[in-house]
Amino acid sequence: MRIAIFINTSWNIFNFRSSLIRTLLKQGHEVHALAPEDDYSLQLTALGCIYHPVSMNNTGNNPWHDFLLVIRIYKLYSEISPELVLHYTIKPNIYGTLVARKLGIPSISTISGLGTVFLTTGKTNKIAMWLYKLAFKYPRWIFFQNQSDLSLFKDKGLLSAENYGLVPGSGINVERFSKSSEPPDTPPFVFLMTSRLIAEKGVREYLKASEILLSQGLPIKCQLLGPPETDHKRGISVDEIHRSTVEYLGEVKDVREFVSRSHVMVLPSHREGLSR
């Protein structure tokens, strides 16, 4: 079977769907990965995917840009002729699903977190809900990763059929992330947050919590690991992190060493699916 996976970044596909891709390839399927080009695009090819770059603005809501995105998706789906498309993140879930429907291609959507648009009550939020309601008539199946997101979609009338289910997160390779060592018993007690540096991930709440705990003289260390998002409208600068009491560790390709040295992992995100 020819299967396409469409997500908003190559990084996202590689970090969260590599195991799925390897399994599909092992089963003999042909896998096409569609996403904007970034540092991880070549690694998708190395996995065995056929990679297709898709130019898109993940956080913008310019209708002309989104119209052009729909045209790009239509051309790619027409050229690839997939027998199934897997959609993740808001624009692939909405526009990808509508294009797949137009071309008669079965699709499956996954809601792995609702993101910024559902933290507001303005015009953008209303448009997003209308588009979800329009698009989600058509997937063969819709996966949700927590009951809160599923309940919201049901309460807002965004689901028109019983074609949905709940799964406990995106899954994790327990061999790759096996517990190989214990953090030291001696102080400091280490908290670690791994996240992109944007407000909706709860970064500022984490900075404030660190300040409060350290002001009480507790023997702790709060660390933050993750890439800056300089182009994101609610991105948090590295300078702001450096002015706080949190130790910024930068961005790494493998978090396991830092996880093994920490006592507690922290996820203060405003609107996640379910952390791995």
Image: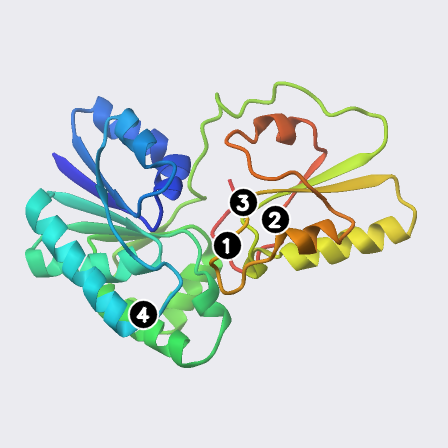
Who comes first in sequence, dot 1 or dot 4?
4
Which quadrant: the N terminus? top left
Residue 243, percent from left and from top: 75, 53
Who comes first in sequence, dot 1 or dot 2?
2
For the residue marked with disc 2, what is the amino acid? Leu
Q: Identify the secondary structure beneath mark 3.
A: loop
For the residue marked with disc 3, what is the amino acid? Pro
Q: Could you classify mark 2 by the number of other residues whose Cα lies within 10 Å: few (under 14), some (14-19), or many (20 or more)?
A: some
Q: Could you classify mark 3 by the number of other residues whose Cα lies within 10 Å: few (under 14), some (14-19), or many (20 or more)?
A: some
> How far apart in space, not on screen, are marks 3 and 2 (Cα)?
16 Å
- 150, 21: nearer the viewer: 21
Residue corresponding to mark 1? 272
Choose mark 3 or mark 2, whichever is in front: 3
Residue at the limit of the structure toward the top, as seen here:
180
Marks 1 & 2, CB-CB < 8 Å contact = yes
Q: Identify the secondary structure beneath mark 1.
A: loop
Q: Could you classify mark 4 by the number of other residues whose Cα lies within 10 Å: few (under 14), some (14-19), or many (20 or more)?
A: some
Residue 198, percent from left and from top: 55, 57
Residue corresponding to mark 3? 227
Choose mark 1 or mark 4, whichever is in front: 1
> How far apart in space, not on screen, are marks 2 and 4 (Cα)?
27 Å
> How far apart in space, not on screen, are marks 3 and 1 (Cα)?
17 Å
Q: Is residue 160 visible?
A: no
Residue corresponding to mark 2? 267
Residue corresponding to mark 4? 158
For the residue marked with disc 4, what is the amino acid? Leu
Who comes first in sequence, dot 3 or dot 2?
3
Who comes first in sequence, dot 4 or dot 3?
4
At a point 15% along the width and 61% down the height, the residue shown is 71
Q: Is residue 174 visible?
A: yes
> How far apart in space, not on screen, are marks 4 and 3 (Cα)?
33 Å
Q: Is residue 15 above or below residue 103?
A: above
